[in-house]
Amino acid sequence: MGMSGPVGERVRWGILATGGIAATFTADLVDLPDAEVVAVASRSMDSAKAFAERFGIPRAYGDWASLAADEDVDVVYVATPHAAHRAAAGLCLEAGRNVLLEKPFTLNAREAEELVALARQHGGFLMEAMWMYCNPLVRRLADLVRDGAIGEVRTVQADFGLAGSFPPSHRLRDPAQGGGALLDLGVYPVSFAQLLLGEPADVTARATLSEEGVDLQTGALLSWENGALAQLHCSIVGGTSTSAYITGSHGRIDVPYGFFFPEHFVLHRDGREPETFKADPAAGPRNSLKHEALEVMRALRAGETESPLVPLDGTLAVMRTLDAIRSRVGVRYPGEE
């Protein structure tokens, strides 16, 4: 038995958690004419009420289960810290809600597999909030690569680092919240490489660990059976250019800044003048999360249980790579084997 889809054209959203990314996403959602934010939940009723007032949301819940049980909600956006993703999304899926789950999908591949199994068992829609995959310019770049614009992909380089400094109490430094550079920031370079090349055959990595045991910066080298390589880096102790480069047998693509929400990229084909592809100003601000929301709503209306842009098998493959990197560098979270 599948879950019921949205009534008519409107899609009714519930927001689970009230932090920064929840506010950013909700602000973009309320701008969409066919999206309606009908409920918000937090473990603190005060936080839920304040968030509801800020965005004009009719219902506020002081616990997650009440939101999960709200049958007037078509889809729940889960925006808790990573360590709570498995519990929060699982609660919603079991109660018959569709779910958009913030990245990284879960702490590890085992938790990710459990959620995917739950969604498939209940016939529910589930998608990782990997907004990069829904970005129109990133989609154009991936299409060009798939169509052979630069020949066979030989190397991918990508980085994402923030200068910090983050105190030990910050979620990015807290093992109990799945802290560290890799899960928060490294998920983007890994997802970018796997968008173009799929799951790697082999993973090597090195990291600088904090006293708490999370990675302050990590470098990974991924390799594929066809000889392709990816050099990836993430950091919470140094601001990087957040750029990406794809080299192929007949050219390359340079994404100079903000590769996961690019302003433009440059295609260099051997023997031809470079071509610049720019983001369409009509598509809204570069940092808009609306493309992700629109894809969820399109899929729900079409009765799809996953998005072809962010397929669950791709999300599981990224989680396996993140697990492999963590095992190489020795980062374990509380409760993991």
Image: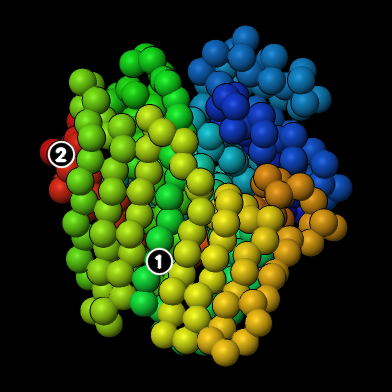
- Tell me which amino acid carries mark 1: Val
Instruction: Kindly indicate the quadrant of the structure image that contains residue 41.
Output: top right
Residue 263 horizontal/vertical position (percent): 68, 55
Quarter the C terminus occupies: top left
Q: Which residue is mark 2?
A: 330
Extreme top residue here?
A: 46
Q: Which element type, helix, strand or loop, lies under badge 1?
A: strand
Q: Which residue is mark 1?
A: 156
Q: Distance of mark 2 from mark 1, alpha carbons?
A: 25 Å
Residue 60 shows up from this direction: yes
The residue lying at 25 percent from left, 69 percent from top is 223
Mark 2 or 1: in front is: 1
Q: Is residue 271 left or right of residue 57?
A: left
In the foreground, 185 or 240: 240
The residue lying at 74 percent from left, 34 percent from top is 27
In the foreground, 170 or 152: 152
